[in-house]
Amino acid sequence: MKRLTLFFLLLPFLLTAQEELDPFSEEALFGDEDPFNEESLFGQTEEEAVQKEEEPVSVLESLEQETRGILWGGKVYSDLQADFTWQDAQADWADRQTWNPQFGADLFIDARPDGDYRVYGKVHFDFDPADSSLDATPGELFADFHYRDRVRFRMGKQMINWSVGYLYSPADILNLEAINPLDPEADREGPLAMKTQIPLKGVNLQLYTLFQEMEEPREITWAPKAEFLAGNWEIGTGAVLDPRMTPKGSLSLTGPVG
């Protein structure tokens, strides 16, 4: 009887101790906060998430977070061209045959030490199996920078895209090479120039200053261009002012059909 009485007297203290030491209780596992509320699961409430999403993120911050560092790569390709010549149409096999294997590679490097500066370079390699020679041709080599994210500059050897065309582009008057119809997707050599770009709302202003094959400052070529948005269409107009040649102009209209 004494043992039973002692057990009932100690029962409240045992229950209290059991409640404090229970390792599987909600408080012991998750603390004082509700483990299934938004803040515990995701670190922020729905209102805070919406407010954070509405905060504007500048282009420079996006570049610093996503594209900082060095990116390099390229492609290796091969091709085999064969020519057959028949002098006698009734002959079983060609009187003359020529095999011309081609091997090449394109390598590029894109370095972005920070969001305000970028350097891009590309080199084209051609290998001739006949004499085991390797030729390297620089493609593009330029640097991108800006002034307060309002005026953007690109300085160096660059390919200039003034219009859209696959086999032929009549407004492509600045590059040193025309589009090759046999290989329309091949890179073309561009001039040594400085590009100045001012993007505005609905208007894109560009000015190319070309230094290719110049001997005196007065031989610098100026090529301004303006692009305007009209609905889903883009209207582009540009001019090439070379003191050694007759001035040229271009007018383009780009948009969806159908």
Image: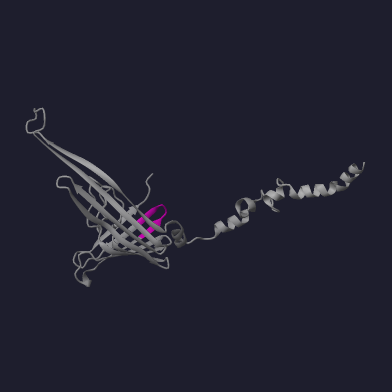
Residue 70 shown in magenta? no
Magenta-tinted stretch: 227-235
Answer with the quarter of the image where residue 137 lies: bottom left
- The image quadrant where one finds the C terminus is top left
> Who is closer to the viewer here, 248 or 139?
139
Answer with the quarter of the image where residue 206 lies: bottom left
Compared with 185, 121 (above or below) is: below
The location of residue 194, given as percent across then percent down, is 30, 65
Which residue lies at the image location 84% right of the left edge and 48% below the top edge?
A: 12
Which residue lies at the image location 20% right of the left edge and 51% below the top edge?
A: 134
Instruction: Determine whether, in the image, residue 46 is placed left or right of residue 145.
Output: right
Residue lying farthest bottom?
Answer: 217
Residue lying farthest left?
Answer: 88
Q: Which coloring applies here?
A: one colour
Residue lying farthest front?
Answer: 2
Instruction: Determine whether, in the image, residue 146 is placed left or right of residue 214.
Output: right
The location of residue 13, given as percent across then percent down, is 83, 49
Which residue lies at the image location 38% right of the left edge and 48% below the top edge?
A: 256
Residue lying farthest right?
Answer: 1
Instruction: Determine whether, in the image, residue 10 is placed left or right of residue 97.
Output: right
Name the dominant secondary structure of the magenta segment: strand
Tally the numbered discs. Answer: 0
Which residue lies at the image location 63% right of the left edge and 54% below the top edge?
A: 45
- The image quadrant where one finds the N terminus is top right
The location of residue 178, given as percent across then percent down, is 22, 53
The location of residue 187, given as percent across then percent down, is 27, 52
> Who is closer to the viewer here, 100 or 255?
100
Instruction: Determine whether, in the image, residue 76 is placed left or right of residue 133.
Output: right
> Who is closer to the viewer here, 167 or 137?
137
